[in-house]
Every structure is written in C-alpha cells, then in structure tokens.
Amino acid sequence: MPPSPFPGPGLATFEFPSLTALHAALDRVYKLGVSLPDAPLARFRAQTARLPQTTEAEQRVGQDIFRSALMDYWGGRCPMTGITDSTLLRASHIVPWADCNDEQRLDVYNGLLLSALWDVGFDAGRVSFADDGTVLVRPELSAAARTALGIESVPRLPDLQDGHRANLAVHRSRHGFS
C-alpha cells in the first residue's frame, strides 16, 4: 500500500480501502515481526533450555521453529510456484544446517520456502538465484526437469534482502554458478 497523501503523525500515513485490507496488512506485519531474525532464535533458546544437550533434540526443535518462521515470512506459499499446501512446502536452508551456527540456522534470510521439487533442485545445486531473484540453472539439469520446474516461465524470487543475497552468494559459489 503506498503512503497516503493525507497528513498524519509519524514519517508516513497509510490509507486502506477497507477494514479487510487493514486487517490483512496488520496480519502481515505481525507475521513478519515473529519471523524476523531475533524471534526464531529466542524461541529456539527457550524451547531447548531444558532439553538434553543432544544434536538430534536441538535439531528437531530448531527445524520446526525455522519452518514456522519461513511459513510466516513467505506468507505460507512457494514464491516460485504459488503452492500453498503446507505438506508440499519445504523449509530450505540456503547455507546448509550443518555449516551454520544456531543464529544462522534460524535466520529467515538463510531460508526459502520452496515446493518439494524446487527444494530438491535447490538443495542439489541444480538451481540457484541471482541477487535480483532471477533463476539460475546448471547445464546438467535435464530438459524434463526444466519443464517440470517451469523454468521458462518462472517468476523472479521476490523480496530478497541483503541477508538473502549474502547467503545466496555462498550457495552459488558452492555449486559452481558464476
């Protein structure tokens, strides 16, 4: 929603065409507030404080928190396909879990919410994303896979932040994208 031309307190005022639009905007602000960097890490530390210090227990809790944060951040949909069926969505780490500390593991800027097929392609390094969100494809990706992913008509990955870009640079480097 663009800033309103009407004067008001603060740096900007906003006008919504309906109460429904206002509620949708407030819901989005809330979901972003609970998913942005510090919130998932704080939830992880609170939930693991009393658990045995085992990698498996912490990983299970951490992955659930990370998935929930990505569901909120990406609005519960794969930005590449539009799929909203949560059973078909994967919380993909850009820099793998094993290569991160707790803060990086739970950072929404180190994650993408992708449909299962996109997740596999991304995790295997067959696809990646440029800093502007353009899809990058490795030559090894078969024609059938390109068709199934809809490579020719897929949109750019939207709303990338500097944190995403830094992590995507690591992903591209790791998988040989130039």
Image (tube, helix red, strand yellow):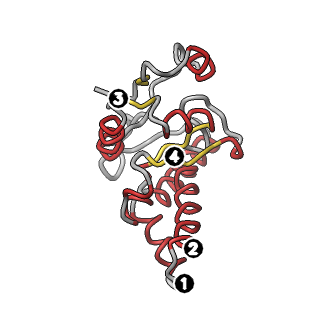
Q: Please say if the residues under marks 4 and 1 sit with CB atoms less than 8 Å apart.
A: no
Going from the N terminus, do you reach mark 1 or mark 2 first? Answer: 1
N-terminal-most mark, 3 or 2: 2
Q: Which residue is mark 2?
A: 57
The mark closer to the camera, 4 or 1, is 1
Spot occupied by residue 156 in the image (x, y as percentages of width and height): 45, 25
Q: Specify the amino acid type for callout 4.
A: Ser
Residue that carries the numbered disc 3 in the rendered image:
130
Whichever of labels 1 and 3 marks the residue nearer the N terminus, that label is 1
Q: Earlier in the sequence, mark 4 or mark 2?
A: 2
Assess whether mark 2 and mark 1 are in contact (beta carbons under 8 angstroms).
yes
Answer with mark 4 or mark 1, whichever residue precedes in sequence: 1
Answer few, some or many: residues within 10 Å of disc 1's Cα (few below 14, many 20 plus, some between 14 and 19). few
**Mark 4 Cα within 10 Å, few/some/many (few <14, many 20+)?**
many
Identify which residue, 137 or 161, lies in the foreground: 137
Q: Which one is closest to the eye, mark 1 or mark 3? A: 1
The residue closer to the viewer here, 100 or 70, is: 100
User: Tag 3's secondary structure?
Assistant: loop
Q: Position of residue 64 (x, y in %)?
A: 59, 61
Q: Amino acid at mark 1?
A: Pro
Q: Which residue is mark 4?
A: 92
Label 3, label 2: how far apart the Cα atoms are: 34 Å
Hey, what amino acid is under mark 2? Ala
Residue at x 60% of width, y 45% of height? 90
Percent of width and height locating residue 3: 39, 37
Q: Which mark is residue 52?
A: 1
Mark 4 → mark 2, Cα distance in angstroms: 19 Å
Kindly identify the residue that appears in the image at 53 percent across and 33 percent down: 121
Q: Nearer the viewer, mark 4 or mark 2?
A: 2
